[in-house]
Image (cartoon, coloured by chain):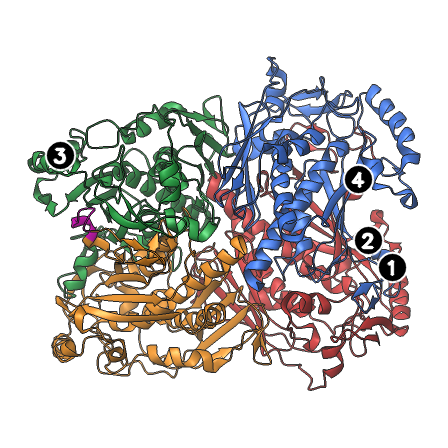
Chain colours: A orange, B green, C blue, D red
Amino acid sequence: MSDNSFGRLFRVTTWGESHGPAIGCVVDGCPPRLKLSEEDIQPWLDRRRPGQSRFTTQRREPDTVRILSGVFEGMTTGTPISLMIENTDQRSKDYGDIARRYRPGHADIAYDMKYGHRDYRGGGRSSARETAMRVAAGAVARVVLRQLFGEELSIRAALVSIGDKSINRTHWDWSETERNPLWCPDPAIVEEWQSLLDGVRKAGSSIGAVVEVVAENVPAGLGAPLYGKLDGDLASALMGINGVKGVEIGDGFAVSRLRGEENADPIRPGPVFEANHAGGILGGISTGQPVVARFAIKPTSSILTPVPSITSAGDAVDVMTKGRHDPCIGIRAVPVAEAMMACVLADHALRHRGQCG
Amino acid sequence: MSDNSFGRLFRVTTWGESHGPAIGCVVDGCPPRLKLSEEDIQPWLDRRRPGQSRFTTQRREPDTVRILSGVFEGMTTGTPISLMIENTDQRSKDYGDIARRYRPGHADIAYDMKYGHRDYRGGGRSSARETAMRVAAGAVARVVLRQLFGEELSIRAALVSIGDKSINRTHWDWSETERNPLWCPDPAIVEEWQSLLDGVRKAGSSIGAVVEVVAENVPAGLGAPLYGKLDGDLASALMGINGVKGVEIGDGFAVSRLRGEENADPIRPGPVFEANHAGGILGGISTGQPVVARFAIKPTSSILTPVPSITSAGDAVDVMTKGRHDPCIGIRAVPVAEAMMACVLADHALRHRGQCG
Amino acid sequence: MSDNSFGRLFRVTTWGESHGPAIGCVVDGCPPRLKLSEEDIQPWLDRRRPGQSRFTTQRREPDTVRILSGVFEGMTTGTPISLMIENTDQRSKDYGDIARRYRPGHADIAYDMKYGHRDYRGGGRSSARETAMRVAAGAVARVVLRQLFGEELSIRAALVSIGDKSINRTHWDWSETERNPLWCPDPAIVEEWQSLLDGVRKAGSSIGAVVEVVAENVPAGLGAPLYGKLDGDLASALMGINGVKGVEIGDGFAVSRLRGEENADPIRPGPVFEANHAGGILGGISTGQPVVARFAIKPTSSILTPVPSITSAGDAVDVMTKGRHDPCIGIRAVPVAEAMMACVLADHALRHRGQCG
Amino acid sequence: MSDNSFGRLFRVTTWGESHGPAIGCVVDGCPPRLKLSEEDIQPWLDRRRPGQSRFTTQRREPDTVRILSGVFEGMTTGTPISLMIENTDQRSKDYGDIARRYRPGHADIAYDMKYGHRDYRGGGRSSARETAMRVAAGAVARVVLRQLFGEELSIRAALVSIGDKSINRTHWDWSETERNPLWCPDPAIVEEWQSLLDGVRKAGSSIGAVVEVVAENVPAGLGAPLYGKLDGDLASALMGINGVKGVEIGDGFAVSRLRGEENADPIRPGPVFEANHAGGILGGISTGQPVVARFAIKPTSSILTPVPSITSAGDAVDVMTKGRHDPCIGIRAVPVAEAMMACVLADHALRHRGQCG
């Protein structure tokens, strides 16, 4: 396991910096003879692409993905699939300020503390731009899952709260998430959220959010004790998304306030589970119920308000982040959440097939 | 990475079932020439041992650890350290009921769905008994950390809420956690918690909790982008503890409700961080601030109230769990949380030394 | 991948030193629902056990293996299988000499150079005693292979040369290998080898050998490009056996002297291969032909002739090795070779099933 | 560990097919703050490039490498280094024949048996073209080794036999290897080899060879018991080079014919080793002596003589390989051998630093 790879049998290695010539990934272990072309990947990238509404960063790039290997005559060969996106919107600009000042709450200072040298242009390796490759890899994972489990398996994510404004879960409508620019499943709150975000954006501020990702019709048996748990791998995958500070499965933190009777998931012959407090995972293994995960994403620290910081020389300085940025990075994390879920499930599906046939 | 191993350079593989002859682990990659004996490990196991108060399961075993390899003349040799605890309290009893009935909310049904065969005695591999080996491995990790970073590095955990009763954080006193059987850092709430738990226990019920684990004086630079993040590995390690349904770092889910200005961690020359919303980790890399993680643990599903379930043949049946059990498994998770933090930090410390010298 | 583990899906981690309390291994990833008991493992250990003829070390131990986990009611559960053998023949003796003198050609000095501390008793971790656990793990691998591919798949090894005395391959008779204490497949040379070894033994000398291991009825398709090649993994597994200095596949080094026409393996419809210069592997992937590997094992450096060496303090000293030892360690490597082949094939079989179904 | 990656801390993942748009690799784990640019890599690729003499394939490509990530302002950042070479010489041609006929001795049939689909153009993934990326990664490894151990550490390879014509080792002159197109260290045999190869080439035949690779001034202590052995990793790395059928360390197969006294490596204070039968490795760990490995490479099966084979439909057919090819692929393996040695040593150097400081 290297630092820039994840997955065991369906294994993704990403590379690239925000303002380098390109970003890319290598997907190793994809089964052979799957129909795959750029058209299977590009739509997912288009969904993620920033700049599609006033609520996401105005960086405008086509994010055109190319398959450089592992596919022949429209089908996967079982060899590594190399995907690449060229960076086209690298505005020529003076990065001198960012180079010498640590943005508080960013990875800047941590990278320098660790490596003593970093690509500061646009956040370099720590930029959310890298998540484009997660989405690309997730598109390949979806192809794997479809071949293994059919069309019924679905993976969808939504934004369920922004700041302290949460959706009303009884309104949940998945099709609504595709109709508004906020991936909001509750039509009744969309307008309120948009006003809120407009205010945040105009104030040069930012705001936190919660994303929920749900996989339905996942077969039972994916996952493993005790350090190959499906929930453990999901936790790691989702916590690794930029800005995420908390992850929960099923009812998550709420179960800490419950009694055993309240949290029970009775089983009826079938098996049919009456409730799904557990989020589809018991003992680290999927049960056939929907796999439900949720994560909290912080308000980006790129704000127009000056915050005390230091220069790389250690001197005090106030830092504020000008230029394009997202008022709520939770929005862009929605397609990434789906992609990570897809990659984790594809990996566990192959691992399960390997061990258990 | 196999399913029963974790860590990369400091790598732990555990084995064993609740009612088999023994449980154990192999710690591979421990640096050589560290003073290590059973006395460095046993006290941590003693802290974890159940049956020390009326609030934890009455299974009574000495849990005596033996070092079977990797140590010579009192010092580690750099070769694998094999640790073993014999199971002595395997009450001879008829497991017929558990064998054929799935306890709702337990791993029983998931293991059978995956493997088609499971050791049902006391939960087998999914039993919390396995966490004894995490504690043992954690004790070795502490020895590694002490040698690398000295006595200043501390790792401590506490219970911060039971049900909806949370501590008052202004009362926080680490020494208090060693004085009450609930690892509670707030002396003012201990009695209330004990009454609550007595009620839960007498009702044959169970209750959820939240555990917080804090590592202080962790050097900056541990962790790595982007799939070797310190927080990603902590999330996986903590989510893998039995019954955990949510993990958060620093302010965690609370940040989803904040604005960027509220969540800012200003940096002063030093560097000194004014706040620690980030929980000591930026971009997946430690900053030198305290590393703070928290997790929610569910009320155990082993309760005296009958819950609808099915038999392994698929027939309806009501299941209730008799016999010894814990009213709040969060209590026993406290030493385990410390151990997982120690293992993750030791692993990242060696990885950092490997790459960055 | 840790230093004391091998395999990816069928993963073996060994631990233990020659004169510690026990040696053992953990087999993780074994498929569930396989019939497995100590009786499936013990016979393979008995075959390997030293002291069965005057040609192997006189260390006499029953080498009784215990299964400590992963098997329930006679069947594997899919969870880690812990195997242990207690060391019973740890003659109380003064190791002072070995402790302070480096035996030339042994791992003694290398371990000290690396770790600065080693268990010198009987070679500690570098002792061939560890290979007992390879044989035990290999027995489990055989159970896996039998379930996957049936009884037809066979794995057998033989000694094909001792010193400059090679067998006549036209005499090859596999059943003969079980009838003489040298695993020799050529009845016509057994007596000559025995005389040779008697001479070597009486002279307090040692002699090198070549071992050949053959797996028949291995299905096509195991292995993978380019760093997961079946031959690459076999090379690593066999080179890792104590004393091995060379590994070859199929015709091996001999092909370096051939023309393309001489080395051709024509294919007939079936496919039927007319020859097997390639040793059953093309492009790192099995073809269905017998998988053939061979390795050279050095004369052990434990001889009665004094050889110049140094003490751990760096002073000159002559070292000769008294006490029990093997005149030809190639003999004892034969069952180990079979075991490593079994483990590598089982691992690749599961990996292939994972990726390709 | 995925199938197209190698190394643990210095980890290389390669991708790409012979006639796809590009080939590339990702080097993850490279230490930060090393001076690195394309100029550090290109010369090594130029040495390997085919078509430089009449003895290697006439495929002519500039093989211009680009660094796409992981380097900023001329220095490594510690993040993944993505290297890419575009394929420019993909002659438009009809691959119909190769597509439907299995070349005997090639990976063609094995890939189809495994994956049921392969990129047949120029061998696809199994083409020796992939080794360009090993050479590129090896160039980065050399930069790592130079920083860790200085200029003294050298890694050089040579061709030591072609067919049954071996060099006279007493003539060995490293500088000679750079003066003839055959990497031959013995000036007295170069002409004879050239005549031999001219004959082979004109006959449309091919011939085997042996390559030796030597690393000098490698520090003691690299490697690890028992499945992380330096020789085990070298064996795997070298066996994985296209066409390699045997690997040996130090005196290799020759030791199988020796007595213990003949194979002894006496140690003098220093330590100074009088001989180096062991090839610089004891117990899997380097001793400070030169690390010496050798491998046998087969005559390529791409010859003009028709050999019986089958079509992908299973029908009998005679196959002969027209077009550019190498009479002795051992020549081109020489720079690859150096690169693999460099990668293995760099990886073990970082692993050693991680565990032992």
Q: Amino acid at mark 1?
A: Leu
Q: Which residue is mark 2?
A: C251
Q: Amino acid at mark 2?
A: Asp
Q: Which residue is mark 1?
A: C258
Instruction: Report if the CB atoms under discs 2 and 1 are less than 8 Å apart.
Output: yes
Circle 3 SS class = helix
Q: Amino acid at mark 3?
A: Asp
Q: CA distance from mark 2 to mark 1?
A: 10 Å
**Are discs 1 and 4 both within one chain?**
yes
Q: CA distance from mark 1 to mark 4?
A: 26 Å
Q: CA distance from mark 4 to mark 3?
A: 68 Å
Instruction: Name the foreground residue: B9 vs C314.
Output: B9
Question: Chain ID for label 2?
Answer: C
Indicate which label's residue lies in the foreground, 4 or 3: 3
Q: Which residue is mark 3?
A: B198
Question: Chain ID for label 3?
Answer: B
* Residue at 38% across, 84% down: A62
Circle 4 SS class = strand
Give the residues drawn in magenta, as a range.
A255-262
Circle 1 SS class = loop
Question: Chain ID for label 1?
Answer: C
Quadrant of the frame with the C terminus of chain A: bottom right
Instruction: Report if the CB atoms under discs 4 and 2 are less than 8 Å apart.
Output: no
